Image: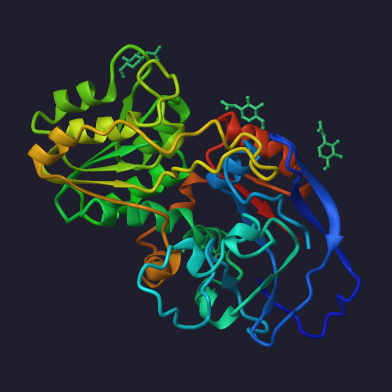
């Protein structure tokens, strides 16, 4: 975060988390400190980074660029680096795909940059357009710094899932997935005045966290499906459903079924309601950067008749955190939002390989890497 122009970092090395292109193999290596390339770049010294569910998609070898990512002014400000950079100029193209408008750090060349944030330093292009400041009163407060860190991706994603579903104050909400994004979608719904929020998952520890913030946990585990359980409590269905799972969805027997959450959302959402997907859907094919990228699918069965007859709306896609960052930052600074409740472990960078595996095994809900 705080850049220091006088520091001599020429030919210096730093520790960085490296994805080698081999599924389930993350290492920590010495790599060169990245150099500034343009006058609009800023080099940021990282104080906190998070391990994202999207990192697990890369870890699994099912998401990212076709080639393995290479390793590669705002002086003194404390800033947040979002998961998606601004191009730094107006892009006059109506059909601009979200991630292609800037770039996504750590996802490799197909996403515009080679560099990830789980390292001591990162160079951010078009820094004035991409970074946002942590309010002065929160600088130096680790709790608040972690809260702000989460605006970079998952808090913004959980919040925007509700927008995709057309959320309004007073709605009832079913959140599918109690991973970090699902938990923060539930937190967002409660902040925004939802009347009841159900959170669906099969992992008991995750559901306990959901319950601790005032959501109603729904466990599907082979005995009874989530839809049946929610309709018992909410006979007319919920007005909004959000998918915080994506392509790794499981059916009620806990077996992989890409459309399982989409089917459940359509079944449990009431007439004129809305559904939203922020969980990732991807099918990059088998490449050296995504060796298991052929294990996913581009097509699913979709119950168009039910969807049509209910008059539902469906919003989906990657989220641009910058669009909601001003609101989320304000909510954190005033103490209304506390997204840091999802953090289960804070580690040093050398422990990253172990904690990727723990996160992958659902033993962690959110891991923060702190740098001295
Ligand atoms: C994991 O990746 C590292 C670094 O690329 C490599 O040295 C090591 O052999 C790999 N381990 C396995 C088990 O493939
Ligand atoms: C850090 O911020 C939190 C949340 O606003 C507050 O409760 C806590 O007292 C602050 N800690 C310090 C050391 O100021
Ligand atoms: C499965 O979920 C149901 C409904 O929440 C619960 O009553 C039951 O104890 C769960 N079973 C297991 C094995 O977790
Ligand atoms: C996926 O590609 C790998 C080669 O990268 C191949 O061994 C495997 O059989 C393919 N799997 C499917 C389901 O097509």
User: Between 341 and 285, which is closer to the camera in this rendering?
Assistant: 285
Q: Is residue 300 left or right of residue 114?
A: left
- Quadrant location, the N terminus: bottom right
Q: Residue 196: x and y, percent?
A: 20, 41
User: Between 163 and 136, which is closer to the camera in this rendering?
Assistant: 163
Q: Residue 87: x and y, percent?
A: 53, 76
Q: Is residue 77 left or right of residue 233?
A: right
Residue ID at (62%, 51%): 65
Residue ID at (67%, 58%): 116
Q: Is residue 317 left or right of residue 8?
A: left
Label tally: 0
Residue ID at (87%, 79%): 8
User: Between 314 and 132, which is closer to the camera in this rendering?
Assistant: 314
Quarter holding residue 300? top left
Q: Is residue 98 left or right of residue 114?
A: left
Q: Residue 84: x and y, percent?
A: 52, 64
Quarter holding residue 207? top left
Q: Residue 350: x and y, percent?
A: 79, 46
Residue ID at (57%, 67%): 81
Q: Is residue 151 visible?
A: yes
Q: Is residue 338 visible?
A: no
Most extreme residue toward the right, as rendered?
11
């Amino acid at each position: 975060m705080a850049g220091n122009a006088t520091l001599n970092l020429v030919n210096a090395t730093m520790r960085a988390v490296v994805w080698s292109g081999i599924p389930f193999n993350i290492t920590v290596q010495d790599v060169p400190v990245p150099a500034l390339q343009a006058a609009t770049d800023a080099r940021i010294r990282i104080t906190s980074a998070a391990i994202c569910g999207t990192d697990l998609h890369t870890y699994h070898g099912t998401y990212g660029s076709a080639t393995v990512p290479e390793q590669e002014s705002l002086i003194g400000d404390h800033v947040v680096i979002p998961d998606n950079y601004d191009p730094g100029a107006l892009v006059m193209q109506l059909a601009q795909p979200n991630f292609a408008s800037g770039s996504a750090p750590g996802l490799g060349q197909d996403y515009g940059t080679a560099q990830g944030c789980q390292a001591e330093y990162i160079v951010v292009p078009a820094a004035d357009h991409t970074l946002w400041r942590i309010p002065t009163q929160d600088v130096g407060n680790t709790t608040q710094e972690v809260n702000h860190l989460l605006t970079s991706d998952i808090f913004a994603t959980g919040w925007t899932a509700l927008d995709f579903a057309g959320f309004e104050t007073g709605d009832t909400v079913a959140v599918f997935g109690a991973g970090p994004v699902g938990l923060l979608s539930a937190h967002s719904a409660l902040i925004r005045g939802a009347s009841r929020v159900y959170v669906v998952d099969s992992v008991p520890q995750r559901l306990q966290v959901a319950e601790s913030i005032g959501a109603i946990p729904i466990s599907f585990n082979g005995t009874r499906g989530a839809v049946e359980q929610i309709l018992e409590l909410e006979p007319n269905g919920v007005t909004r459903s959000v998918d915080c799972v994506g392509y790794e969805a499981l059916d009620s027997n806990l077996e992989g079924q890409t459309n399982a959450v989409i089917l459940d959302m359509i079944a449990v959402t009431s007439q004129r309601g809305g559904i939203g997907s922020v969980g990732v859907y991807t099918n990059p094919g088998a490449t050296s950067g995504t060796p298991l990228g052929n294990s996913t699918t581009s097509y699913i069965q979709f119950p168009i008749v039910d969807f049509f007859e209910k008059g539902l709306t469906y919003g989906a896609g990657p989220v641009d955190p910058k669009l909601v960052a001003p609101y989320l930052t304000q909510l954190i600074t005033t103490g209304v939002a506390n997204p840091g409740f999802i953090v289960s472990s804070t580690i040093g960078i050398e422990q990253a390989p172990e904690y990727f595996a723990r996160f992958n095994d659902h033993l962690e809900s959110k891991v923060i890497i702190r740098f001295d």
